[in-house]
Amino acid sequence: MKTIYLIRHAKSSWDDQTVEDHERPLNDRGRKDASRMSKYLSDKGIRPEITLCSTAKRTKETYSYFTSFFGGIPLSLIKRLYHAPVSVLEDEIRSIDNQYNAAFLVGHNNGVSDLVAIILNRNVDLPTCSFTQIEFPVDDWKDIDLLNAKVVAAISPKELPV
């Protein structure tokens, strides 16, 4: 069994319109959501072994809140994950070393929502800083198939306990 813990980056700031999209930071709500989500996932026993993360500032900043609970695991910053479509997400998941059975993937819409939509066979619009746990009934990452995957858990910041 292989597991992806899919995280859409937290809410980013649009305060400075001169900042290039790739370099947009999180806003206050985004920082609060990332902090709360990371603690919640740690408390729930989520245990990734590696993290794949887009190189965008907002994805790296989102993940920085997770490092207080999930620090010490390998981090792979991947430029291709920036606004990646499903095909690129699948390629990157398939390229995970088989020594790992569970991985964080921190990315962007529309790709992350589209990936979940394929699995659930319905339209999906994941909120910022949402978490989706996806299981693949395979022993080798190269064998993943979205049509055989299962969403086993999902939560957004608004659904977190107070």
Image (cartoon, grey):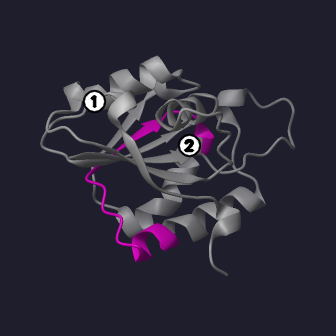
Image quarter of residue 69: bottom left
For label 2, the crowd category at 10 Å Cα-Cα, with few meaning under 14, some 14 to 19 and many 20 or more, is: many
In this rendering, the answer to whether 155 lies above or below 25 is: below
Q: Where is residue 96 in the image (x, y as percent from the top left)?
A: 24, 33
In this rendering, the answer to whether 152 lies above or below 108 is: below
Disc 2 marks which amino acid? Answer: Thr
On the question of residue 32 being in view, the answer is no
Residue at the top extreme of this rendering: 87
What residue span does the magenta drawing correspond to? 39-58
Q: Is residue 14 magenta?
A: no
Q: In this view, does 95 lie to the left or right of 146?
A: left
In this rendering, the answer to whether 69 lies above or below 150 is: below
On the question of residue 146 being in view, the answer is yes
* Label 1: element kind: loop
- Front one among 30 and 85: 85
Determine the residue positioned at 87% across, 32% down.
17
- Front one among 156 and 63: 156
**What residue would you read off at disc 1?**
144
Q: Is residue 35 left or right of residue 47?
A: right
* Label 2: element kind: helix
Determine the residue positioned at 39% across, 44% down.
150
For marks 2 and 1, give the one nearer the viewer.
1
Q: Where is residue 25 in the image (x, y as percent from the top left)?
A: 69, 45
Q: Position of residue 116 (x, y in %)?
A: 52, 37
Image quarter of residue 156: bottom right
- How many discs appear? 2
For label 1, the crowd category at 10 Å Cα-Cα, with few meaning under 14, some 14 to 19 and many 20 or more, is: many
Label at residue 59: 2
Determine the residue positioned at 35% across, 26% down.
92
Disc 1 marks which amino acid? Answer: Ile
- Front one among 145 and 103: 145
Determine the residue positioned at 57% across, 34% down.
56
